[in-house]
Amino acid sequence: MKTMLVILLSAMLTDNFVLSKFMGICPFLGVSKKLDSAAGMGVAVTFVMICATLVTYPIHHGILVPNHLEYFDTVVFILVIALFVQLVENILKKCVPSLYSSLGVYLPLITTNCAVLGVTVLNIDNNYSFFNSIINALGGGLGFMLALVIFSGVRKKLEYADIPETFKGVPATLIAASIVSVSFMGFSGLFN
Amino acid sequence: MAESKNNLFKELTKGIIKENPTLVMLLGMCPTLAVTTQAMNGIGMGLATTFVLLGSNIVISALRNVIPDKVRIPAFIVVIASFVTLIGFLLEGFVPSLYDSLGIYLTLITVNCIIFGRAEMFASKNNVISSAFDAIGMGIGFTIALFIMGSVREVIGSGQWMGLAIPVIHNNPMLLFIMPAGGFFTLGMIIAAVNRLSRKKPPQEISCEGCPNFEACGKAGGCK
């Protein structure tokens, strides 16, 4: 129980995927302009991270390891994630149209999000058990959502700020992200 | 002949300055921020990415008439992931220290937007030779950007450069610069400097064109 909590909170706060591991920077900077799209993206990423872990973990330990094919991890994982996202999208479209209209648009995004591939590879690298892998994916996804939601608030303020011409746009956003990242450094050393 | 040579030269040089993938087109932010705590890591990451980019651009351009349009994204991803696996083996065998310091980010070259973007925007539409030159140019541009990032962060953050101690700063380095927050800050500053120096008005947003996520991001209200 304690390990699970530590994995969950450290994936969310101390080792936040966006702000300290730099995974998923593109959606972090691209989709954080509005609160609702940031939240939607966060939910979708969390969902896909958990699903991707559910699929890739058995494949790694059940098929690749017994056949000594661990080096195929990258190729297999990315294909499986891409296929799986497509599958979920089709199922949602057919069976739960209301959920599809609110979540579905974000799904194709996730195929090439490095945070999703990152979490599956990290689960294998850290030798987590199946259950802990899922907890790690959940924490990673929630941390991603937290970062996006917080940052969408910061960006709203940034829009009204008087910024020098040179810094307008991406530079100002990046510097704001750096300050948000400093605030997350406050969590470091939470588990010692 | 002279003209085609001239064109190839253009493909090569555009990636270095005019369309620098990181500093002008703002692609491939994740590795740019993550591995540049040292100048050497920046070069290593840049060259590894160049290798993957060159390989994938050549293969994808050679197969551009074979791959059906509908399944091009998975097809591109498989080609890219294969080259990433290959460079992983090569680095593990010959440069284990670099392999260790790049860590998971080596695997994540697979989902680097620069590589996918070049496959989508260039290699799938042009012949093998110009795609190869395009890849080399973009790769060099990316390597230079990572080297600059790495140098700034290493000099300020740990008071040395490529392992050489720098007097004065060496005793009191600003540790913040080699931490994640410093990465965001340094990149922001460098892009601001590029904005200032370039005569043309640079893009205000991250260019998501060519990213496989482009359409979906647009629907979600970002990256337009």
Image: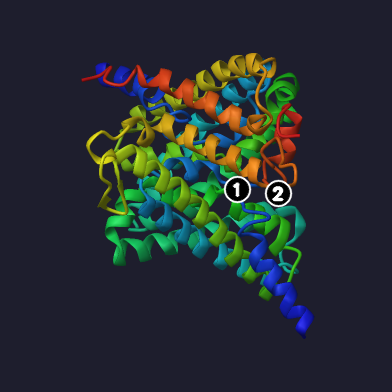
Tell me whether circle 1 and circle 2 mark residues in contact (CB < 8 Å): yes
The chain under label 2 reads: B
Q: Residue A117 in the image: x percent, y percent?
A: 49, 41
- The amino acid marked with disc number 1 is Cys
Q: Residue furthest bottom?
A: B1
Quadrant for residue B59, please give it. bottom right
Q: Residue A133 in the image: x percent, y percent?
A: 37, 31
- Location of the N terminus of chain A (image quadrant): top left
> Residue at label 1?
B113
B33 left or right of A27 in image: left
The chain under label 1 reads: B
- Location of the C terminus of chain A (image quadrant): top left
Q: Residue B212 in the image: x percent, y percent?
A: 67, 45
Secondary structure type for disc 2: loop
B116 left or right of B45 in image: right
* Foreground residue among B172 and B162: B172
At horizontal 26% and vertical 53% (from top left) the residue drawn is: B164
- The amino acid marked with disc number 2 is Gly
> Residue at label 2?
B210
